[in-house]
Amino acid sequence: MQFERRDFIKTLLALPVIGGITALFISPFVRYLKPSSGPLATAEVFKQPDKPAPVRIVKFDVADFPEPWSFKYFMFQEANREYTSVGEQIKTIPGAVVRTPSADGSPNFVVFSRVCPHLGCVFNFVPHEAEVAKGYNYTPNPGQKVFACPCHLSVYDPMQEDTKGRGKVVSGPAPRSPFKFNFELQANQIVISSLESGGIS
């Protein structure tokens, strides 16, 4: 079978198209193996995943919360590493510290991210039962204090725990509880160091 001139020209014209398609598939794979920021050392492959680092540790005095259900809002900043020329991305996360009741009267705290797991609105701590019943379509039990989202009326009870020990969703469309902040009590201070890791659960 004779290879005609027309077939030869078609083959030549098809080569750039085939090469382009091949490059489209190979390029992401190569970028996965070798990040764009600096050479990839063998040791990098076996490193632990990059974790966000706090830009500044947030601290409160325990005395700022004189009685159960005292609360304060705060903004927590963390740096997330990026393999780009920027190097990192700073994320600001709104949070809340709430002193909860304890059997012996000693200070007990919960520290939550205020980002609603439903669609990312910022929710509030609402200690007044009448306000919750009127504005959030949820009737709390006597003495129950809750976090509540003004966007789609999700309500979280900080005294009830889900399977991961977070404030339980008691009303609304939220698919899970909000994330907690990791903190310690050190010398009469609440030291907030990081946000718990994990995806949607």
Image (tube, grey):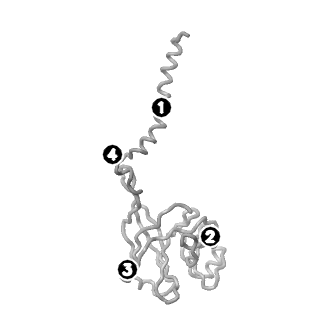
Q: State the residue position of label 2.
A: 153
**Can you say whether 49 is above or below 31 in the image?**
below
Q: Nearer the viewer, residue 152 or 164?
A: 164
Identity, as a three-letter code, of the amino acid under mark 4:
Pro
Choose the circle earlier in sequence order: 1 or 3.
Answer: 1
Q: Which mark is residue 39?
A: 4
Alpha carbon distance from label 1 to label 3: 59 Å
Q: Which residue appears at 54% of the width and 72% of the height?
A: 166
Q: Nearer the viewer, residue 133 or 1?
A: 1
Are dots 4 and 2 in contact, CB under 8 Å?
no
Tell whether 188 sits left or right of 170.
Answer: left
Q: Quadrant of residue 64?
A: bottom left
- In the rendered image, residue 92, in percent from the top left (x then y), is placed at 44, 64
Dot 3: element? strand
Q: Nearer the viewer, residue 199 or 70?
A: 199
**Can you say whether 172 is above or below 90 in the image?**
below
- In the rendered image, residue 133, in percent from the top left (x then y), is placed at 65, 78
Identity, as a three-letter code, of the amino acid under mark 2:
Leu
Alpha carbon distance from label 1 to label 2: 50 Å
Tell whether 133 sits left or right of 29.
Answer: right
Q: State the residue position of label 1.
A: 20
Dot 2: element? loop
Q: State the residue position of label 3.
A: 186
- In the rendered image, residue 45, in percent from the top left (x then y), is placed at 38, 50
Give the label, 1 or 2, closer to the camera.
1
Q: Residues within 10 Å of mark 2 (few under 14, many from 20)?
A: some
Give the label, 2 or 3, closer to the camera.
3
Alpha carbon distance from label 4 to label 1: 25 Å
Dot 4: element? loop
Q: Which residue appears at 48% of the width and 20% of the height?
A: 12
